[in-house]
Amino acid sequence: MAKHTAHSSGGEVIRLDKLTKRFPGQSTPAVEELTLEIPAGEIVVFVGPSGCGKTTTMRMINRLIEPSSGRIFLGDDDVTKINPDQLRRRIGYVIQQVGLFPHMTITENIGLVPQLLGWGKSRIRERADELLELVGLEPATYRQRYPKELSGGQQQRVGVARALAADPPVMLMDEPFGAIDPITRERLQNEFLRLQQLIRKTIVFVTHDIHEAIKLGHRIAILDKGSRVAQYDTPERILSHPADDFVAEFIGPGASVRSLGLTNLVDVELDTCCVVELDASVDKARAVLARTRQDRALLLDEQRRPRGWRRAADFEQGLLSGGGPLAVLRRTQTVHDVLNELLRTGDTVAVIVDSDGAYDGVLRLETIMAMSGHVSPTEPAVRTQEPRGEEPRTGEILANDTVGVRRGEPS
Amino acid sequence: MTIAPEHLVEPLSTPPSAAPARGGVVRARGAIGLFFTPVLLGLICLALYLYVHARPLDSIEQRSLNRAFIGERLLQHIQLTAVSTALVILIAVPLGIALTRPALRRATPFVLGIVNIGQAVPSIGVIVLLAITVGIGFGKAVIALVIYSVLPVLRNTMVGLQQVDRSLVDAGRGMGMTKSSVLLRVELPLAVPVMLAGIRTALIINVGTATLATFTNAGGLGDIIDAGLVLDRRPVLITGAVLVAVLALTIDWLAGLAERVLRPRGL
């Protein structure tokens, strides 16, 4: 996405102090004495059933809804009583309906808040280009277009760019991906996470989708009626230790499986296995298997991309034949994806590759079980004895054999 | 809100000529109309000229059918139309804006009710009633025309503003635009097409109704028609009627042109 990082000032802490909203003519307050601290630079997701007051709470932060009582702090400033229009120019705002102005070009839409703040024309143009690039839209193609010429996903990218225009320390996002098809939503969520790594804003994100909350939030505030905070914690803690029945019911069944979706393969120490390169001789391959006491080896091609598993018996037909389906995953995927792939292929070992598709290591089912605190009773967690450092040597030995596979084929 | 809904849902109802071109096919046809209308109108004027010139005019006819008389009436007619429409815009647009603001929304049914009466009463009635109560002349005729044509502009201003997507207003306010800046930069530009349709309707009403101003001594092309009727001179009658029709169509054509030019891009 962004080759150069857009200028960003990072986030500011938001503190809500006994925030209450009573709508006229309603007996119970929509939000009752909510006290919450949203740490600087984090994504905090407000999630809860409809009518719990999460949107009302969010709209009180930029005072689109004026609180009946309580106070709001942005950084060290008490913003409860300051001019709301001035306040909102310090807070990015993204809504589900996107709300791009149809009669303005993309650049004009993005440049609105900077214009309100009195920026010069050329500075606004530069900023718009910079932001378009940041959200993955080619500026030359899109800057003069009108919103109706963009797809829903592209419009919401512009919506996010517009909210970031004046580099506000805080962003409020009200179900921003709610009206977007599931595939695009997934992509936008991933891009959003990557974007946040660059800009480090304090983001309040409202959704009713607990999966989205778990995926995006550094912290999740699960809200019950009247914006009562049922639990305010990291996704991991909420999944593993729901505070009460309401939270448990809200996150639904399958919390353990879902928590695996939070573990990225980048953060996992991979297992190793025996590898054989394509141009190795059968004899050498067999020798390596025997030496490492493994029952199968992973065949790699010239670019070290996995080609398939080979058992000693398969070598009779030469290296190219044999082998079942292969569970291959990239390092950017999660342990949950590994589990899914293992179930699909019926294997117990998944091959993990780097961004070029080259072999990086393997992940065994036992390792995953051990990760979630279980050890399979029948099979002791056998991790390969072969240390990782030895792999290249295995490959090296075999690769040194000048004649490749074809020589190994039975004549 | 409880406004007579038929007036709000159908902002473009009154004369069919005022309906704005929508969609590709219609717009293409509109473009052809934009080109052929002036040609057609020119041909009609030529035909009228030849018709009048081909016959020997008696002295009575000559008193009406001369350049100075017709020119003056034409000018008066255009003035009546222009002044009344300008006044209507000055009154109805701000009123329409005010009535769609939250503070004044309650007054909407009341105001629309009054304005409705203006249009429900036949135009000749409005003019005559006004002539009886406040007097005759150009100014009084303009008042009558304003009363009669304020409704379409007011109604379309309100509908145009109300049909602006609420989420756009929310987005604008949420990003720190003031209320007036949301109104000026978002709501009004987006309401322009519907408002223009209303103004076009008002123009057409005024150009037609201004013909009746002759009865209150305010001049206009109605003088020629009236003379033709009273003096029983067919060429005079035809000249007046054709000129009114040609003027109305010309103004409608100009208004259509304006609608095209002023419609915001990107809609």
Image (tube, coloured by chain):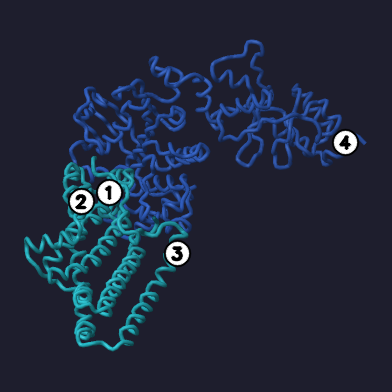
Query: Marks 3/2: CA distance?
Result: 33 Å
Q: SS for tag 1?
A: helix
Relative placement, left or right, of A32 versus A7 is left
Per the image, the residue denoted by label 4 is A409
Q: Residues within 10 Å of mark 3 (few under 14, many from 20)?
A: few
Per the image, the residue denoted by label 3 is B29
Q: Chain of mark 2?
A: B
Q: SS for tag 2?
A: helix
Query: Marks 2/1: CA distance?
Result: 9 Å
**Residue A274 location in percent, x, y?**
72, 28
Indicate the amino acid at tag 3.
Arg
Q: SS for tag 3?
A: helix
Residue in front for this viewpoint, B20 or B135: B135
At 39% from the left and 39% from the top, the residue drawn is: A96
Do tags 1 and 4 sit on the same chain?
no
- Disc number placed over residue B204 in the picture, else none: none
Q: Residues within 10 Å of mark 4 (few under 14, many from 20)?
A: some
At 65% from the left and 33% from the top, the residue drawn is: A328
- Which quadrant of the figure contains the N terminus of chain B? top left
Chain whose colour in the figure is blue: A
